[in-house]
Amino acid sequence: LGLGAASAAGSAERATTIMLVRLLALVWWFGAASALHLAALHRRVAVGADSSLQLKVVYDADRLSPLPCVLFFSGADCSHESYMWLAERLARAGCAVALSSCVVPFGPKTCLLSTPFDLGALGSLEAYKRGPSRAGIAAILDELRALAAASDGPLAGRLDLGRLAVGGHSSGGRTALDLASFDEPFGVAAVFSYGASLVNSGMGAFAERGSVLPCDAARPPPLLLLGGSEDGVSAGLSESGDATETLRRTMAEGVAPGSGRAELCILRGANHMAFCEPVDPTCSAVDSDRPLGADGAAVRSALGALIVDFLGAAGVAGSRLAPEERTAALAPPLIFAVDAVRVPEDARCVGAEVAAAGAATAAQPAGQAAAAADEVAWEA
């Protein structure tokens, strides 16, 4: 009885300590948020002779030092405003974030994407590797260079395109992944994606449905691959209906045969559209998705923390997360599975102790805890 009481007291003390740590982290977070002077600059950018896109550059107006740049590519039919939560988080970390959108013809229909899309590039693997979105990406970067080189203006002399990261969600995530997989001319220093994989959908003649293109970039940038255990869109590309299979295959069949390094983190209960806030109910991915099985705000907080920490480790953002913010955001029950290829332990966003705690969370039925431990056991 004495031992049981002592154990209970110890558990209560640990819980209190964890709560205090997280409260301190929240106090720090709100202090940082109150100091943020969020601003945006809007431009219409021509892409070739016949296309254009709307560009929004989000940044902290009070930061005077040159800002590393993050290009973010939206999912199909997802307004770039649905990713303002991430743009704000990255601006707080000292980055300038380029969001964009344009209407792209797709046969008899149209689609909202971040850049124009060359359907002709889907006709062969060689053309696909050059990039269906290459012209739009180049136009955005040219505009950012012009803004930085201008003699005056809010971003004159304030953008550091030598520290360039790209990220994306869904189809925009595939655009980002391709920049980590194949040789590209843009000098990308880091890539992150959510709800995307290198498993091919069968659209176009460059690859069969269900196949994985191995990464063959000569000098690939580090990659952070993010996903959710309830992603219905990813599950639709899996023969087994497993929402995590396409991410696992991307690591095993796409990243591992190449020379790059990548970290994978799958969040428990997150679905495909958890990356958007708000979610546009007219987006076609909504109909294919599974119900969200976690708190959306907590999922996005964890995703923001993972991305900022990754960009810090890659040398894009100024520094990695403070330990207290990492503790507050990366609650172990949210971590469903992790994996890594050629990433040193001290450079990983999710440490082994957090992954193990997530696998053994008491919130799971006993029979599922062993399965979750197997998921975490892929860690390389």
Image: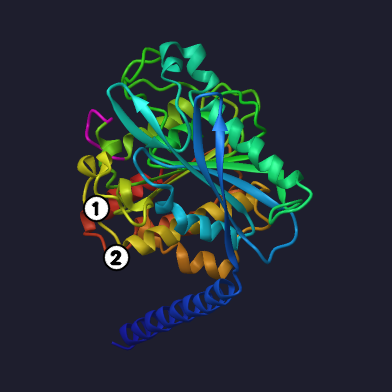
Residue marked by disc 2: 362
Place of residue 70 in the rendered image (x, y in percent of width and height, measured from the top left): 59, 46
169 shown above or below 307: above
Q: Nearer the viewer, residue 334 or 128?
A: 128
User: Can residue 346 be seen from the camera position used here?
Assistant: no
Q: Which type of secondary structure does the marked residue at label 1 adopt?
A: helix
Place of residue 4 in the rendered image (x, y in percent of width and height, measured from the top left): 31, 83
Q: Nearer the viewer, residue 176 or 229?
A: 176
Residue at 36 percent of width and 24 percent of height:
200
Q: Amino acid at mark 1?
A: Gln
- Asked if residue 158 lies left or right of residue 321, the reply is right
Q: Which type of secondary structure does the marked residue at label 2 adopt?
A: loop
Q: How packed is label 2: few (under 14 Cα within 10 Å), some, or many (20 or more)?
A: few
- Asked if residue 198 lies left or right of residue 240, the reply is right
- Asked if residue 49 lies left or right of residue 188, the reply is left
Which of pointers 2 and 1 lies earlier in the amino acid sequence?
2
Q: Nearer the viewer, residue 157 or 285?
A: 157
Q: Amino acid at mark 2?
A: Ala
User: Can residue 308 be seen from the camera position used here?
Assistant: yes
250 shown above or below 265: above
Tell me the distance, in whole angstroms, between the alpha carbons under discs 2 and 1: 10 Å
Instruction: Please identify the dominant SS of the magenta region.
Output: loop
Place of residue 311 in the rendered image (x, y in percent of width and height, measured from the top left): 60, 50
Residue at 37 percent of width and 63 percent of height:
297
Q: Which residues are magenta?
A: 237-243
Q: How packed is label 1: few (under 14 Cα within 10 Å), some, or many (20 or more)?
A: some
Residue marked by disc 1: 368
